[in-house]
Image (cartoon, grey):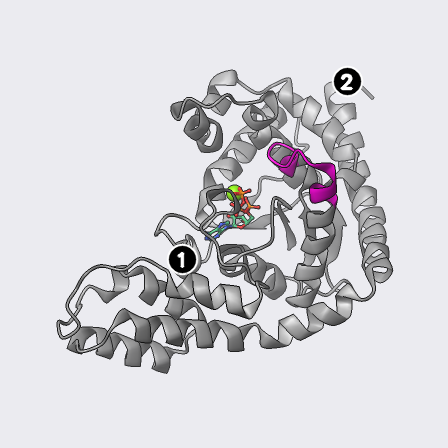
Amino acid sequence: MKVLSGIQPTGRFHWGNYFGAIQQYIDLQHGNEAYYFIANLHALNTVRDPKALSGYTLDAALDLLALGLDPSKAILFVQSDVPEVSELCWLLMTGTPMSMLANCHAYKAKKEKGLPADVGLFTYPVLMAADILAYDAEIVPVGEDQIQHIEVCRDLAGSFNHHFGEVFVLPKARVLQATAKVPGLDGEKMSKSYNNTIEVFEPIGPARKKIMRIPTDSRPMEEPKPDYEGDNLYQLFSLFATEAQKAEMAAMYQKGGFGYGTVKKALADAAETYFAAARERREKLAADPAGVKEILRDGAARARKKAGEVLSRAKKACGVA
Ligand code: ATP
Ligand code: MG
């Protein structure tokens, strides 16, 4: 199968990115033709500081490699290194109804808050469609928030095919039910732009402090909490716990007689252990930025080859070749 996914360098990766998306990237690199890219053109919609953007882009590559992305198995590259995608985006834009994009949630949410939105944010789903279609991707591993954008991609590909002949492969989203929407410190979706994240490689001290400050309800200690599955802390703990550890924690919630401090400590310990090996790998990788840049260059060359083929197929079909 051909697999593709992208992740924005809008900040450092957090637990939601890892459990919703990156974990799937790593699983799917085995036995598939997998393309993973760092979406710096999308990030430009929000990061307007050039130093920060290029810094986050290199950090993104380091994080992905440290977490287990293997460049001998998957193709890892930076979005802007494949200009074919931007050209393909234009071809798709010419057939995109305004009303379809006006319905997309990233744009809608901004508009509802009364914030000014750029054309880049409005057309974001079209660039994302081009990102996917350029590699004939069949499977797109993502978190729940991206399902709508993949539907847009399927619609655009379907109508292009209808009009110009069978050019594009229609992709399917792949979402892991248990981790489709990891909650942030405030209980909302964990998101780089909501300032409610714990980063995968956050230094241990500050990460613990954040965990200890997660707001909880005012349940008296002795009382049980039977609705533990809806509890933010329990959900976060579950990300890192084995089935047996989860059952033990669930029993504690059902019985009562515990304070949330106990759960927070268990969560901090579990997270620290879970990412310890990756943290070590990241330190080694960070000592060789030239090596990482070489991996990205090589990935881009391979990605361009594929995207070039699809672009020329699309151009021929619509009469601009
Ligand atoms: P931004 O706030 O800049 O949009 P983000 O944190 O939402 O950043 P993205 O780069 O938009 O991250 O998303 C990268 C991938 O991570 C996507 O597949 C997205 O669905 C997934 N993802 C992001 N946040 C979560 C979350 N809280 N739970 C599960 N998956 C998530
Ligand atoms: Mg996002």
Across and down, in percent, residue 42 comes to 63, 36
Residue at 59% over, 65% down: 27
Within the image, what quadrant is residue 79 found in? top right
In this view, 101 is above or below 219: above
Q: Could you tell me the amino acid type at mark 1?
A: Gln
Residue at 81% over, 47% down: 300
Label 1 belongs to which residue?
177
Across and down, in percent, residue 303 comes to 78, 46
Of mark 1 and mark 2, the one earlier in the sequence is 1
Within the image, what quadrant is residue 320 found in? top right
Which label sits on residue 139?
Answer: none
Residue at 70% over, 23% down: 90
Q: For this rendering, which residue is in front, 75 or 260? A: 260
Label 2 belongs to which residue?
319
Residue 133 visible from this viewpoint = no
Q: Which residue range is magenta in the image?
A: 42-54
